[in-house]
Amino acid sequence: MMKLGFGLMRLPCKSADNSDIDINKTMELADAFLAAGGTYFDTAYMYHGGKSEVAFRQAVVERYARDRFTVTDKLPIFQITKAEEMQAIFEEQLQRCSVDFFDYYWLHALGSESYQTAQRLNAFAFICEKKRLGLVRHVGFSFHDSPALLDRILTEHPEMEYVQLQINYLDWDDPTVCARECLEVAKKHNKPVIVMEPIKGGALANVPKDAEDLLHSQDPSRSIASWAMRFAASCDQVIMVLSGMGTMEQMQDNLSYMKTFIPLNESEKQAVMQAAELIRNSIAIPCTACRYCVDGCPKHIAIPDYFAIYNNLKRYGESQRVGAMTYYQNLRVNHGAPSDCIRCAKCENHCPQHLPIRAYLTQVEKELEHHK
């Protein structure tokens, strides 16, 4: 099985509305992926404002035989307060995707708070019962927290078959994400790993010039994004690397080196670690643009978009000021401004990176709203 998985959280859209998916372009991407031998699709209840599962149905399920693909979906523990909601959401997901079973079904984005919720709701038993009934083939969870908590979960729930982890060379030794240590915990428990955010929301596809030159010195023919994808796929225990592909260019690039995969050699591993240090020094706000923070924001603040504008301004300097302010003003037409934040902290509770979003919004406000 090819190690490249098609993540359905950054699909092409027809407008700035993240739920306005361009289904024709999505079909073209799915066709190219399947034609190259890809089979693994990954979606979730809240991706693209709840439209990702529907897009998967339209682009894949309604156009291909069931044995041509596998699909992963996830139970959004962080959105659930009552046990009976799990069944309702599961049934809705089957309906949205129009499948009789999920090949893989995860508890979504477990962390310290959501793990407590999962325990209280007996969510682990819930997904295992779906497996017993044949509605799910394999069970597991995606995870964003400390290695200690991961070890605890896998110790208390050895019935979980897979773990989905955020692994990329920038987060490898990051004290918050702890990618390397979390991978070691998965290895300790002999759990296969599916990788999410291998390119860290696109940050590792658009790196500073010095990091780009360093990677090109190893092999100028390879794309910058390929180094991140190959790094993740080269890690022990990793069986699948997800990529949120939104363009045909991204799809073809990924397929060019993942279809016949060659792991990084020692020289290449050293190069990406050196590149990580250069990149780390250039990123003001380490946001992956997963958009979990946007869900439920009472002021509809386009948090990842404002962070991206801010990061570009900080990376490239005042030469980008006019463009940054134009993008900023355009966003404000249909979204709340950073200054509209009411400090409710819903965004921080949903953030897999555990970012101090409210503090960052204050920085963005000062830079974009109050700059003379």
Image (tube, helix red, strand yellow):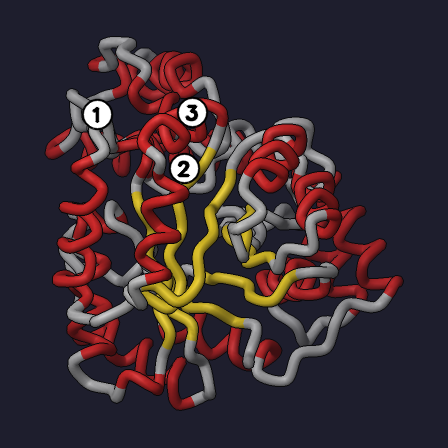
Identify which residue is drawn at 85% across, 54% down. Answer: 270
Residue 308, numbered label: 2
- Amino acid type at mark 3: Gln
> Viewed as shown, does residue 360 lie left or right of 199?
left
Q: Position of residue 111 (x, y in %)?
A: 48, 30
Identify which residue is drawn at 39% across, 67% down. Answer: 137
Report the front residue among 244 and 99: 99
Where on the picture, by quarter, is residue 153? top right
Nearest to the eye among marks 2 and 1: give it: 1
Residue of label 1: 297
- Amino acid type at mark 2: Ala
Q: Position of residue 294 (x, y in %)?
A: 26, 33
Q: Is 48 placed above or below 363 here?
A: below
> Viewed as shown, does residue 323 lie left or right of 24?
right
The answer to whether residue 150 shows anywhere in this view is yes
Q: Quadrant of the N terminus?
A: bottom right
Residue 116, numbered label: 3
Label 2 to label 1: alpha-carbon separation: 18 Å
Q: Give the mark nearer the N terminus: 2 vs 1.
A: 1
Q: From this viewpoint, which residue is outermost toward the right? A: 266
Identify which residue is drawn at 68% across, 28% down. Answer: 175
Where on the picture, by quarter, is residue 55? bottom left
Label 3 CA crowd tier, 10 Å (few <14, some 14–19, many 20+): few
> Viewed as shown, does residue 357 lie left or right of 332?
right
